C-alpha cells in the first residue's frame, strides 16, 4: 500500500484532509481549525512531499521523520498540518483492518466515554450560563460541566467586572452539590490571582482548574498546582513532547490535556496519554468544537487507560462545523458510545465536499 494523493478541502477556518492509496483506499482527517489557508500551504509544501509514496501503516514513523526534517521550522502550523495528514492515515489503516481506530490504538478500555458539558463563552452572564448548563444536565444527563473564568491570556483581567467571583458561586448554588463543576482560565491569571481564584473554586467544591496561567510559563502553573488542593490541568496549547514530559515529570499539572490537532496527530497525543498513565496522572484530551477532532478525541479516550475522567464536549454551535460529516456522535445519559465502525466511522457530506476549496498533492 502506497500513499498516492493528499487532498485538502478548506471551508472557512476548517481544513479537512483526504488521503488516497494506490489500492483505492481513502481516509479522512483534519488539521486543527483556524488560519486554515496557512495550514494548507504548509501541508502541501512541507508535509505532503514527505508522505507521498510511503506506506500509511508507517504513520507514526513518518510523522517523526517529518518533524525531525523540519526541526528548524518547528511551529504550530507545521504540527497542525501534520495532524491533518496523520489523522487521515489512521482512517486508512482502520478501514484496511476492518477495525475502529480505537482498537488499533490498544483496544477499547471502556464501552462508553463520559463527557462534560464545556462552555466556550465569556460573554454569557452567570445567570444565563447556569440556566443553559442546568438544561443540558436535565436533557442529556451530563454529570459534569465547565465554565470560563477570567479573560484569555488576560493578565488578571475579567470578561466583565466581577464576573469570575459571581459565576463561581452562582453555578454551585443553582446546579447543586451533585454536579462536578470545573473552570477554565485560558491562561488569564498571574500566580497570586490564580491561587486566589483556585481557593474560591475549592471553597465551592469545583473539580478542576484549567490553564490558570499563560501556558508557556510552566513554572507559574506549577506554583499554582503546588499551592492548591483542586486539580490543575493544562497542555492543550503545547506541541512539544519534551514539554509534556517536563509537565508530567515535575507534576506541574494534575491532569494533562493534549490536543490531537495541535500536537501533530493521534500518535503523539497517545504518547502523552501513555506518559501520563505511567506517572499516575489522568489524561483528558482537549477538544473545543464539534469538528472531526471530536471523533478523533473520542477514539483516543476510548482506548487510553489514563482517560479516566469525563472528556470535553463543547456545547457551542459553530457555523463552520455544521454539515461537514456524519454521523455525528451524540451524548446520552452523559456519555457517548465507543465507535465500532472501521476507521473513524464517519463520512464527509457531499454538500461540504462541493462547497470547499480543493488543493491536491499527487505522487
Image (spheres, helix red, strand yellow):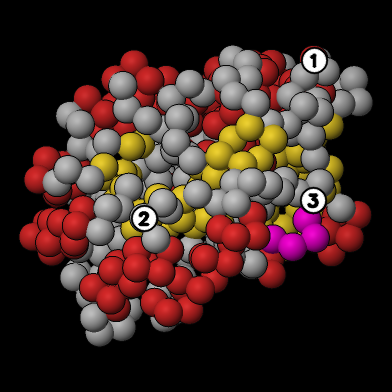
Question: Residue 236 or 118: which is nearer the viewer?
Answer: 118
Residue closest to the far front: 177
Q: Earlier in the sequence, mark 3 or mark 2?
A: 2
Q: Residue furthest bottom?
A: 161
Position above or below: 97 against 303: above
- Residue 210 point in image, percent of width and height: 32, 51
**Which residue occupies the foreground of this view, 316 or 5?**
316
Q: Choose between 326 and 207: the one closer to the eye.
A: 207
Question: Can residue 72 be seen here?
Answer: no
Asked if the residue at tag 1 contacts the one at tag 2, i.e. Cβ–Cβ closer than 8 Å, the answer is no
Residue shown at the point (76%, 49%) measured from the top left = 328
Q: Residue visible at 26% across and 29% down?
A: 248
Nearest to viewer (mark 2 / mark 1)? 2
Q: Which residues are magenta?
A: 321-325
Q: Nearer the viewer, residue 325 or 77?
A: 325
Whether residue 323 appears in magenta in the rendering, the answer is yes
Q: Residue at x 59, y 15 (%)?
A: 106
Compared across the picture, whether 155 is left or right of 357 comes to: left
* Quadrant in the picture for residue 194: bottom left
Disc 2 target residue: 177
Q: Is any atom of residue 227 visible in this view? A: yes
Residue positioned 27% across, 36% down in the render: 254
In the rendered image, residue 346 lying in the magenta stretch gets the answer no
Magenta span: chief secondary structure: loop
Q: Quadrant of residue 28?
A: top right
Counting every numbered tag in the picture gives 3
Query: What residue is shown with label 3?
Result: 325
Residue linked to disc 1: 97
Where residue 170 sits: x, y (%)? 33, 72
- In the image, residue 255 sits, relative to residue 182, either above or below, namely above
Amino acid at each position: 500500500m502506497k500513499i498516492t494523493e493528499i487532498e485538502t478541502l478548506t471551508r472557512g477556518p476548517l481544513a479537512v484532509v483526504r488521503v488516497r492509496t494506490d489500492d483505492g483506499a481513502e481516509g479522512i482527517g483534519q488539521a486543527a481549525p483556524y488560519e486554515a489557508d496557512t495550514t494548507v500551504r504548509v501541508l502541501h509544501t512541507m508535509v505532503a512531499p514527505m508522505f507521498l509514496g510511503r506506506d500509511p501503516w508507517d504513520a507514526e514513523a513518518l510523522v517523526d521523520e517529518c518533524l525531525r526534517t523540519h526541526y528548524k521550522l518547528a511551529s504550530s502550523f507545521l504540527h497542525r498540518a501534520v495532524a491533518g495528514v496523520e489523522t487521515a492515515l489512521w482512517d486508512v489503516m482502520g478501514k484496511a483492518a476492518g477495525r475502529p481506530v480505537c482498537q488499533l490504538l490498544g483496544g477499547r478500555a471502556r464501552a462508553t466515554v463520559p463527557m462534560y458539558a464545556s462552555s466556550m463563552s465569556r460573554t454569557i452572564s452567570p445567570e444565563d450560563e447556569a440556566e443553559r448548563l442546568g438544561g443540558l444536565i436535565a436533557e442529556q444527563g451530563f454529570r459534569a460541566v465547565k465554565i470560563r473564568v477570567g479573560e484569555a491570556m488576560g493578565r488578571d483581567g475579567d470578561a466583565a467586572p466581577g464576573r469570575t467571583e459571581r459565576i463561581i458561586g452562582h453555578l454551585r448554588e443553582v446546579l447543586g452539590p451533585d454536579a462536578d463543576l470545573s473552570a477554565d482560565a485560558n491562561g488569564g491569571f498571574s500566580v497570586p490571582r490564580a491561587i486566589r481564584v483556585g481557593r474560591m473554586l475549592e471553597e465551592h467544591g469545583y473539580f478542576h482548574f484549567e490553564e490558570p496561567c499563560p501556558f508557556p510559563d510552566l513554572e507559574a502553573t506549577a506554583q499554582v498546582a503546588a499551592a492548591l488542593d483542586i486539580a490543575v490541568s493544562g497542555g492543550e496549547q503545547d506541541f512539544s513532547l519534551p514539554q509534556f514530559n517536563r509537565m508530567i515529570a515535575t507534576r506541574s499539572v494534575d491532569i494533562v490535556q493534549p490536543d490531537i490537532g495541535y500536537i501533530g496527530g493521534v500518535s503523539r497525543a497517545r504518547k502523552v496519554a501513555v506518559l501520563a498513565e505511567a506517572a499516575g496522572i489522568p489524561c483528558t484530551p482537549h477538544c473545543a468544537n464539534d469538528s472531526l477532532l471530536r471523533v478523533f478525541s473520542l477514539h483516543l479516550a476510548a482506548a487510553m487507560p489514563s482517560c479516566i475522567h469525563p472528556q470535553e464536549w463543547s456545547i457551542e454551535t459553530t457555523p463552520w462545523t455544521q454539515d461537514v460529516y456524519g454521523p455525528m456522535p451524540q451524548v446520552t445519559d452523559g456519555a457517548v458510545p465507543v465507535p465500532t465502525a472501521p476507521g473513524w466511522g464517519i463520512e464527509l457530506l457531499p454538500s461540504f465536499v462541493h462547497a470547499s476549496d480543493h488543493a491536491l498533492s499527487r505522487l
